[in-house]
Amino acid sequence: MELWYTEEQTDNVRLSLKVKQHLFSDHSDFQQVDVFETAEYGRLMTLDGLVMVTEKDEFVYHDMITHVAMAVNPEIKNVLIIGGGDGGTAREVLRYPQIQHVDMVEIDKMVCDVAKEFFPTISNELENPKLALYYEDGVAYMKGKNSVYDLIIIDSTDPVGPGEGLFTTEFYTDCFNALTENGILINQNESPVYEQFAKEAVRANSKLKKIFPEVHVYQAQIPTYPSGYWLFGFASKKFHPTKDVKADVWNKLGLKTKYYNTELHLGAFALPNYVKEFFNNGNV
Amino acid sequence: MELWYTEEQTDNVRLSLKVKQHLFSDHSDFQQVDVFETAEYGRLMTLDGLVMVTEKDEFVYHDMITHVAMAVNPEIKNVLIIGGGDGGTAREVLRYPQIQHVDMVEIDKMVCDVAKEFFPTISNELENPKLALYYEDGVAYMKGKNSVYDLIIIDSTDPVGPGEGLFTTEFYTDCFNALTENGILINQNESPVYEQFAKEAVRANSKLKKIFPEVHVYQAQIPTYPSGYWLFGFASKKFHPTKDVKADVWNKLGLKTKYYNTELHLGAFALPNYVKEFFNNGNV
């Protein structure tokens, strides 16, 4: 007998992973949560049937959503993570000794609970005393915050279901206000390859450009996400993501990373022409 | 009714593309050749059931296998393409006015015939008078050539089946001898994500390092290839692929490309740490 997990990445493209065991399946107040032991990618968590995280390739996503901003501003002390319930982003942020406090706002407690039970290498800093974990709606949490955070990381699902409100102009404006004058906002920004994702990527980018003076897009290869080619957004009140990178400072920290390095940092912002055109023209 | 093409990328991972029509299916002297009309990627050619080329993402592969070398040495005049039967690499090479002659050695005439019939936008330079097309074994063709080509592009299938001999030390040595003193060799160099591909990538790289003074690896996002993350090899008798790039010269040519640009050229050589470690350590 063979068991296969299949994600319908679009109506016309499917990725299937061979499954050794279906370890967990439940419906939270917000979404369907499943855990599989896969043959190629180790453990896999899906939300509403879509890949959220796998043990084998999570390092790409978590390196790139964290270290780019930390290398641009090594003075970051207070961080907010919206979403990120598996704990991987918190784990990477908390590797920096200069971090004083991290607030993490995850709407779905079940995601954290499942991460703690089934993904110990990803969730292992969720009990760190520097971290305050709120099981709340990120949109509501952001209201009225003023100059509190040096870095906000929007580690959300796609803009359907529980993550939808995290892609609005109103939410991005609240983030802008919640950031200090050195503030940086990072968001996962979808894929440029399939039209439905690319449109969301361009839409999020256009909204950010109306609010932040510096808005840029960078890329990484995440094999289990649709097309394997994923984008992140970098928005900032004053820092340029490549001109202002403090490569020497970051390298002196001596952090061992499996994906990120400071040369790749520069390369990640060197987008293919077709992707640049999407963002320059504002449509796909 | 639904029709789906499925590639078994590894024993544990499958990519499936929805098919509108199965347009062609035949067995040549060397391999099984099929053409499908897919819903997401336009027309798809498979060889022995594996994705060779699709209309939608071929531009990534053909840009990256061609323009990197051309930007490092804009004096390239004589080119050899080994494989590349769909014609996409020849099409990109022949866009440069300085090119005097291209030899192309494709073992399987059926691949060229099928490309001409079903992929006119890819094969449209196969009748160019500057191109000589030989339906021969690339390994045999390379024997005894001395200082003939400025650029050799190994646009091969994977190192199983007809492409196997194109990954040997002997063949790479023949290529070295066939290159002029300014010569550059480009090869498609597999994916770092899945062990079986990564091992072949490291093996090819190790062999090249014993022959060429400059051997480097660069990357691109090709969604229909296993993992979506693909590598190319750059080997040269004297040029460094980033220090010696002639960005201004290349940009003055005014070539419109959908993927390649000279900033991306630099970024393509900025590999993730785990990939650098594979190649530095010589094992996966």
Image (spheres, coloured by chain):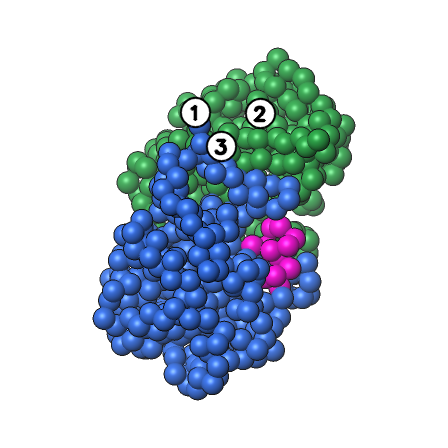
Chain colours: A green, B blue
x and y percent of residue B99 in the render?
28, 73
Residue B1's label in the rendered image is 1
The boundaries of the magenta stretch are: B191-202
Q: Could you tell me what secondary structure mostly forms the magenta stretch?
A: helix
Please give left or right for residue B25 compared with residue A27 in the image.
Answer: left
Position of residue A56 relative to residue B82, above or below, is: above
Of the two numbered discs 2 and 3 on the same chain, state the one appearing first in sequence. 3
Residue toward you, B154 or A183: B154
Position of residue A15 relative to residue B242, above or below, is: above
Question: Both on one chain, marks 2 and 1?
Answer: no
Nearer to us of marks 1 and 3 is 1
| Circle 1: residue type | Met
In the rendered picture of this protein, how many numbered marks are placed on residues?
3
Q: CA distance from mark 1 to mark 3?
A: 20 Å
Name the residue that disc number 2 marks. A49
- Residue pictured at 49% horizontal, 32% vertical: A9
Q: In which quarter of the view is residue A31 placed?
A: top right
Q: In which quarter of the view is residue A176 placed?
A: top left
The chain identifier of the residue carrying mark 3 reads A
Residue A9's label in the rendered image is 3
Residue toward you, B60 or A262: B60
